[in-house]
Image (cartoon, grey):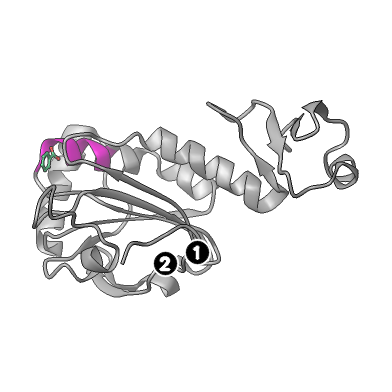
Amino acid sequence: MAIRLGDIAPDFTADTTEGTISFHDWKAGAWAILFSHPKDFTPVCTTELGYTAKLGAEFAKRNVKVIGLSVDSVEDHDAWASDIEETQGTKVNFPMIGDPDRTVANLYDMIHPNADDTLTVRSVFVIGPDDKVKLTLTYPASTGRNFDEILRVIDSLQLTAEHSLATPVNWTPGDDVIIAPAVSDEEARERFGAFDAPKPYLRYTKAPS
Ligand code: BEZ
């Protein structure tokens, strides 16, 4: 069954390039990105994994743990890692799940048979400290994802989780943010000080630093 926003991310135990991991224990109250790629030793995937590794410090700053997956074996992931380092200039610094029997891929509905009946699509699940799914994305094999966008979404999700703030169209960090409708004007003044309200339902404020 499809995994929906707000669902508890299904737990699993799997072999990875960093040993056997039980997912919920591994994430241990942090944010997590669980993402699949279609296949090892393929060009688009090589660039995605290299770039994700380059963002390691940005994810750590935000308390986000990253874990990748494909239906290849851990041995293949290990062999491929040296190509990623050689061509992308970065060591893979997060675990990659080996899922040749597709246990996790099926649990997370990462195989879309009308696209490809054996390989995973490019799925992304952002999971909060409460183990609930906060974001899902699905890209086809031929389109590399924008991991800067995934980082931007995490910044927005964390503003919501910590401050009841939302983010407007095309928001990037540093731009004004939106006070969530559930927050009254009185509470908004207490929490954020002055705010600009061109409409009663459209209230902008500065993002907390
Ligand atoms: C790639 O990563 O380049 C790729 C993988 C599977 C199908 C098509 C492209």
Q: Which residue is mark 2?
A: 9
Whether residue 190 is situated above or below residue 29 in the rendered picture: above
Q: Is residue 156 left or right of residue 69?
A: right
Q: Quadrant of the N terminus?
A: bottom left
Q: Position of residue 53 (x, y in %)?
A: 33, 43
Whether residue 54 is situated above or below residue 20 in the rendered picture: above
Residue 16 seen in render = no
- For the residues labelled 2 and 1, the Cα–Cα distance comes to 6 Å
Tell me, yes or no, whether the highlighted magenta stretch contains residue 49: yes
Q: Residue at x 83, y 30 (%)?
A: 195
Quarter of the image for residue 69 reads bottom left
Q: Quadrant of the C terminus?
A: top right
Whether residue 134 is situated above or below residue 192 in the rendered picture: below
Contact check, label 2 and label 1, Cβ < 8 Å = yes
Name the kind of residue labelled 2 in the image. Answer: Ala
Magenta stretch bounds:
42-50
Q: Which mark is residue 132?
A: 1
